[in-house]
Image (cartoon, grey):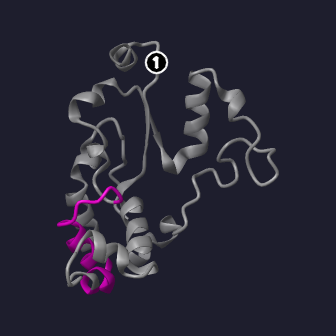
Amino acid sequence: DALHMLTSREWTRAIFVREPKDRILSAYLDKGIRKDSNYIKVHCCPGKGMCVERAQRSFMGFLEVISQCSDPHWLPQTYRMMGRYWQYINFVGHIENAEADTRRLLEEIGAWKYGRSGWGENGDEPIFATKGTVKHSTAAGDHLSEHYNRETEAAVRQLYSMDFNNPMFNFKDDLL
């Protein structure tokens, strides 16, 4: 039953998380400036769409808009489940280390044979081996220095303090 699966040591309960600075910059590049303004308009500023211009003007403007807009693309990852269930998670992987963390997870549950091959363009690579990480369409990690400064980093640290402080996530406290 579900309670047994949730509490038994026989089961692995895994979650993969993404470093917040990279994650929110990716959301900005994808939902804030790359695509047309419909996503922000529909999800954050219904009606006349008055906040779209502010969200598109700058990364800081985007952070100000999303601080008032609840959306799964930028909610803290700590909110993915109710707090009382975090104690049952016994594997946390990081998107930035997807290849190694997926292998570690699959080895722990005896399923590495499913990740060892059959992936990649020719079907002869291990899962996520092509770049060692999950491919994100925005390549946000390559643009961190273009969009982060002391002000934006402080705003992200405040918006995602729950994620940075969640001991299960083990995010490094690196300044850019």
Location of residue 104 in the rendering, given as x and y in whole percent from the top left corner: 58, 31
Amino acid identity at mark 1: Trp
Location of residue 105 in the rendering, given as x and y in whole percent from the top left corner: 55, 30
Identify whether 105 is placed above or below 64.
above
In-front residue for pair 171/47: 47
Location of residue 132 in the rendering, given as x and y in whole percent from the top left corner: 63, 50
Residue at x-position 24% and y-position 71%: 44
Q: Is residue 66 magenta?
A: yes
| 71 sits to left or right of 145 | left
| 33 sits to left or right of 80 | right
In-front residue for pair 134/71: 71
Q: In this figure, which residue is indicated by the disc labeled 1?
A: 11
Dominant secondary structure, magenta: helix
Q: Is residue 9 magenta?
A: no
Identify whether 6 is placed above or below 30.
above
- The answer, for residue 81, to whether it is visible in the render is yes
Query: What segment carries the magenta color?
Result: 53-73
